[in-house]
Image: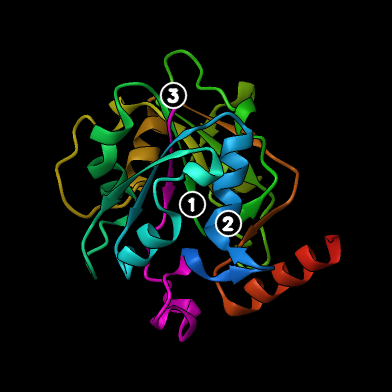
Amino acid sequence: MKAMILAAGRGNRMCPLTDTTPKPLLPVAGKPLIQYQIERLVRAGFRDLVINHAHLGVQIEQALGDGQRFGARICYSPEGEGRALETGGGIFKALPLLGPEPFLVTNGDIFSNIDYSALRLAAGDLVTLVLVDNPPQHPQGDFVLGDHGKLLSEGERRLTFAGVGLYDPALFASCQPGAFPLAPLLRQAISQGRASGYHDKGQWMDIGTPERLGQLEKILKSDV
Protein backbone atom coordinates (compact mmCIF):
# COMPACT_ATOMS: atom_id res chain seq x y z
CA MET A 1 0.00 0.00 0.00
CA LYS A 2 1.20 3.49 -0.85
CA ALA A 3 1.00 6.49 1.46
CA MET A 4 0.65 10.20 0.89
CA ILE A 5 1.88 12.98 3.16
CA LEU A 6 -0.01 16.26 2.81
CA ALA A 7 2.58 19.04 2.80
CA ALA A 8 1.09 21.79 0.62
CA GLY A 9 -0.37 24.04 3.32
CA ARG A 10 0.85 27.61 3.61
CA GLY A 11 1.12 27.44 7.41
CA ASN A 12 -0.23 30.94 8.03
CA ARG A 13 -0.52 30.38 11.79
CA MET A 14 3.19 29.58 11.84
CA CYS A 15 4.24 32.94 10.41
CA PRO A 16 6.86 34.36 10.41
CA LEU A 17 8.54 30.92 10.68
CA THR A 18 6.97 29.82 7.40
CA ASP A 19 7.80 32.98 5.47
CA THR A 20 11.07 31.44 4.32
CA THR A 21 10.69 27.77 5.30
CA PRO A 22 7.81 25.46 4.35
CA LYS A 23 5.97 24.20 7.41
CA PRO A 24 6.94 20.52 6.92
CA LEU A 25 10.62 21.47 7.12
CA LEU A 26 10.42 23.40 10.39
CA PRO A 27 13.02 21.82 12.69
CA VAL A 28 11.95 19.93 15.81
CA ALA A 29 14.60 18.41 18.08
CA GLY A 30 17.15 18.40 15.30
CA LYS A 31 15.20 17.27 12.25
CA PRO A 32 12.34 18.46 10.02
CA LEU A 33 8.81 17.87 11.25
CA ILE A 34 7.91 15.83 8.15
CA GLN A 35 10.83 13.46 8.72
CA TYR A 36 9.12 12.02 11.79
CA GLN A 37 6.17 11.09 9.58
CA ILE A 38 8.39 9.53 6.93
CA GLU A 39 10.26 7.44 9.49
CA ARG A 40 7.06 6.22 11.15
CA LEU A 41 5.54 5.27 7.80
CA VAL A 42 8.64 3.35 6.78
CA ARG A 43 8.67 1.47 10.10
CA ALA A 44 5.05 0.53 9.45
CA GLY A 45 5.98 -0.97 6.09
CA PHE A 46 5.10 1.92 3.78
CA ARG A 47 7.97 2.38 1.34
CA ASP A 48 6.29 4.14 -1.58
CA LEU A 49 5.42 7.68 -0.52
CA VAL A 50 3.83 10.60 -2.34
CA ILE A 51 4.30 14.11 -0.99
CA ASN A 52 2.40 17.10 -2.36
CA HIS A 53 3.69 20.62 -1.96
CA ALA A 54 3.00 24.23 -2.94
CA HIS A 55 4.49 27.01 -0.78
CA LEU A 56 8.30 26.86 -1.16
CA GLY A 57 7.84 23.30 -2.33
CA VAL A 58 11.19 23.09 -4.08
CA GLN A 59 12.81 23.23 -0.64
CA ILE A 60 10.93 20.07 0.35
CA GLU A 61 12.21 18.18 -2.69
CA GLN A 62 15.74 19.41 -2.09
CA ALA A 63 15.66 18.42 1.59
CA LEU A 64 14.11 14.96 1.21
CA GLY A 65 15.29 13.91 -2.23
CA ASP A 66 14.17 10.53 -3.49
CA GLY A 67 13.78 9.20 0.06
CA GLN A 68 16.49 6.58 -0.27
CA ARG A 69 18.26 7.57 2.92
CA PHE A 70 15.01 6.97 4.84
CA GLY A 71 14.45 3.58 3.23
CA ALA A 72 11.62 5.00 1.12
CA ARG A 73 10.84 5.88 -2.49
CA ILE A 74 9.41 9.41 -2.60
CA CYS A 75 7.47 10.88 -5.50
CA TYR A 76 6.24 14.47 -5.48
CA SER A 77 2.97 16.05 -6.55
CA PRO A 78 3.70 19.77 -6.98
CA GLU A 79 0.71 22.08 -6.94
CA GLY A 80 2.45 25.33 -7.84
CA GLU A 81 3.68 28.14 -5.68
CA GLY A 82 0.75 29.79 -3.90
CA ARG A 83 -1.82 27.52 -5.57
CA ALA A 84 -2.49 24.78 -3.03
CA LEU A 85 -5.45 22.65 -4.05
CA GLU A 86 -6.87 22.03 -0.55
CA THR A 87 -6.95 18.51 0.83
CA GLY A 88 -9.45 17.01 -1.60
CA GLY A 89 -7.96 18.60 -4.68
CA GLY A 90 -4.43 17.73 -3.61
CA ILE A 91 -5.24 14.04 -3.15
CA PHE A 92 -7.18 13.96 -6.44
CA LYS A 93 -4.21 15.42 -8.34
CA ALA A 94 -1.92 12.78 -6.83
CA LEU A 95 -4.15 9.80 -7.74
CA PRO A 96 -2.04 8.82 -10.80
CA LEU A 97 0.96 8.47 -8.46
CA LEU A 98 -1.04 6.60 -5.80
CA GLY A 99 -2.44 4.00 -8.18
CA PRO A 100 -5.72 2.05 -8.27
CA GLU A 101 -5.52 0.42 -4.84
CA PRO A 102 -6.54 1.92 -1.46
CA PHE A 103 -3.90 4.20 0.04
CA LEU A 104 -3.09 5.93 3.30
CA VAL A 105 -3.02 9.71 3.71
CA THR A 106 -1.60 11.61 6.66
CA ASN A 107 -1.21 15.29 7.39
CA GLY A 108 2.40 16.41 7.36
CA ASP A 109 1.95 18.68 10.38
CA ILE A 110 0.92 16.15 13.03
CA PHE A 111 3.02 14.15 15.45
CA SER A 112 1.68 10.85 16.76
CA ASN A 113 2.44 7.24 17.59
CA ILE A 114 -0.48 5.92 15.51
CA ASP A 115 0.26 2.40 14.27
CA TYR A 116 -0.26 2.87 10.55
CA SER A 117 0.25 -0.82 9.87
CA ALA A 118 -2.85 -1.70 11.93
CA LEU A 119 -5.30 0.34 9.83
CA ARG A 120 -7.70 -1.54 7.59
CA LEU A 121 -10.34 -0.58 5.03
CA ALA A 122 -13.43 -2.73 5.52
CA ALA A 123 -15.06 -4.40 2.54
CA GLY A 124 -17.43 -1.98 0.84
CA ASP A 125 -16.06 1.07 2.64
CA LEU A 126 -14.58 4.05 0.83
CA VAL A 127 -12.75 5.44 3.85
CA THR A 128 -11.45 4.63 7.31
CA LEU A 129 -10.51 7.62 9.48
CA VAL A 130 -8.41 7.74 12.62
CA LEU A 131 -10.13 9.73 15.36
CA VAL A 132 -8.60 11.10 18.56
CA ASP A 133 -9.88 12.74 21.73
CA ASN A 134 -10.72 16.39 21.17
CA PRO A 135 -7.72 18.66 21.80
CA PRO A 136 -8.13 22.03 23.54
CA GLN A 137 -8.00 23.92 20.24
CA HIS A 138 -10.81 21.80 18.73
CA PRO A 139 -13.24 20.91 21.55
CA GLN A 140 -16.27 20.43 19.30
CA GLY A 141 -14.77 17.44 17.45
CA ASP A 142 -15.64 16.31 13.92
CA PHE A 143 -17.33 12.92 13.74
CA VAL A 144 -19.09 10.34 15.88
CA LEU A 145 -18.00 6.71 16.09
CA GLY A 146 -21.14 4.62 15.92
CA ASP A 147 -21.94 0.93 16.21
CA HIS A 148 -19.47 -1.50 14.62
CA GLY A 149 -17.05 1.35 14.00
CA LYS A 150 -19.22 3.16 11.46
CA LEU A 151 -18.80 6.92 11.24
CA LEU A 152 -21.70 9.28 11.87
CA SER A 153 -21.89 12.99 11.12
CA GLU A 154 -24.07 13.80 14.13
CA GLY A 155 -24.22 12.61 17.72
CA GLU A 156 -23.24 13.43 21.28
CA ARG A 157 -19.78 11.90 21.59
CA ARG A 158 -17.84 13.65 18.86
CA LEU A 159 -14.18 12.94 18.25
CA THR A 160 -11.54 14.80 16.25
CA PHE A 161 -10.30 13.64 12.87
CA ALA A 162 -6.58 12.99 13.36
CA GLY A 163 -5.64 13.83 9.78
CA VAL A 164 -4.92 10.17 9.05
CA GLY A 165 -7.09 7.94 6.90
CA LEU A 166 -7.29 5.10 4.40
CA TYR A 167 -9.05 5.93 1.14
CA ASP A 168 -10.36 3.97 -1.79
CA PRO A 169 -9.73 5.92 -5.03
CA ALA A 170 -13.42 5.45 -5.81
CA LEU A 171 -14.12 8.12 -3.18
CA PHE A 172 -12.93 10.66 -5.78
CA ALA A 173 -14.76 9.17 -8.78
CA SER A 174 -17.03 12.18 -9.32
CA CYS A 175 -14.34 14.84 -8.75
CA GLN A 176 -12.83 17.25 -11.25
CA PRO A 177 -9.35 18.83 -11.21
CA GLY A 178 -8.97 21.94 -9.11
CA ALA A 179 -9.09 23.05 -5.50
CA PHE A 180 -11.75 21.48 -3.27
CA PRO A 181 -12.05 20.32 0.36
CA LEU A 182 -12.14 16.71 1.50
CA ALA A 183 -14.92 17.07 4.08
CA PRO A 184 -17.91 16.93 1.66
CA LEU A 185 -16.61 13.66 0.22
CA LEU A 186 -16.24 12.20 3.70
CA ARG A 187 -19.77 13.23 4.67
CA GLN A 188 -21.15 11.74 1.47
CA ALA A 189 -19.42 8.42 2.24
CA ILE A 190 -20.81 8.58 5.79
CA SER A 191 -24.34 9.16 4.50
CA GLN A 192 -23.94 6.08 2.28
CA GLY A 193 -22.79 3.97 5.23
CA ARG A 194 -19.41 3.47 3.59
CA ALA A 195 -17.14 5.16 6.15
CA SER A 196 -15.63 3.68 9.30
CA GLY A 197 -13.41 5.00 12.05
CA TYR A 198 -10.86 3.98 14.62
CA HIS A 199 -10.40 5.74 17.97
CA ASP A 200 -6.70 6.03 18.71
CA LYS A 201 -5.92 6.88 22.33
CA GLY A 202 -2.16 7.27 21.98
CA GLN A 203 0.01 10.31 21.50
CA TRP A 204 -1.21 12.85 18.95
CA MET A 205 -0.48 16.53 18.40
CA ASP A 206 -1.52 18.97 15.70
CA ILE A 207 1.54 21.17 15.24
CA GLY A 208 -0.36 24.18 13.98
CA THR A 209 1.20 27.05 15.92
CA PRO A 210 4.67 28.10 17.10
CA GLU A 211 3.55 27.37 20.66
CA ARG A 212 2.67 23.75 19.86
CA LEU A 213 5.90 23.41 17.89
CA GLY A 214 7.74 24.49 21.03
CA GLN A 215 5.76 22.02 23.15
CA LEU A 216 6.75 19.16 20.85
CA GLU A 217 10.37 20.26 20.99
CA LYS A 218 10.31 20.01 24.78
CA ILE A 219 8.62 16.60 24.70
CA LEU A 220 11.12 15.13 22.27
CA LYS A 221 14.14 16.53 24.07
CA SER A 222 12.86 15.22 27.39
CA ASP A 223 12.58 11.72 25.87
CA VAL A 224 16.25 11.65 24.85
How is the model colour-coded? rainbow
Determine whether label 2 and label 1 are within 8 Å by CB.
yes
Estimate the spatial distance between the alpha carbons at disc 3 and disc 2, rounded to whole Å. 28 Å
The local crowd at label 2, few if under 14, some if 14 to 19, many if 20 or more residues have their Cα within 10 Å, is some
Viewer-side residue, 123 vs 3: 3
Seen in the picture, residue 137 relative to 148 is either above or below; the reply is: below
Which residue is tagged 2? 110
| Eye-nearest disc, 3 or 2 | 2
Residue 151 percent coordinates (x, y): 53, 33
Going from N to C along the chain, the mark reached first, 3 or 2, is 2
Residue numbers of the magenta segment = 1-23
Residue type pointed to by label 3: Gly
Left or right of 106: which side holds 10?
left
Q: For the residue labelled by badge 3, is the local secondary structure a helix, a strand or a loop?
A: loop
- Which of discs 3 and 1 lies nearer the camera? The answer is 1
- The residue that appears at 40% across and 52% down in the rendered structure is 65
Mark 1: amino acid: Asn
**Outermost front residue:** 69
Q: Is residue 12 magenta?
A: yes
The residue at the point 52 percent across, 32 percent down is 46
- Give residue 107's mark: 1
Q: Report which residue position mark 3 lands on.
A: 193
Percent from the top left, x then y, of residue 170? 29, 25
> Which residue is at a point 68% across and 66% down the rendered structure image?
136
Q: Secondary structure at mark 2?
A: strand
SS class, disc 1: strand
Q: Nearer the viewer, residue 5 or 60?
A: 60
Q: In the rendered view, tell whether residue 215 sits above or below residue 224.
A: below
Nearer the observer, 158 or 129: 129
In the rendered image, is residue 27 in sight?
yes
Q: Residue at x 45, y 25 (%)?
A: 1
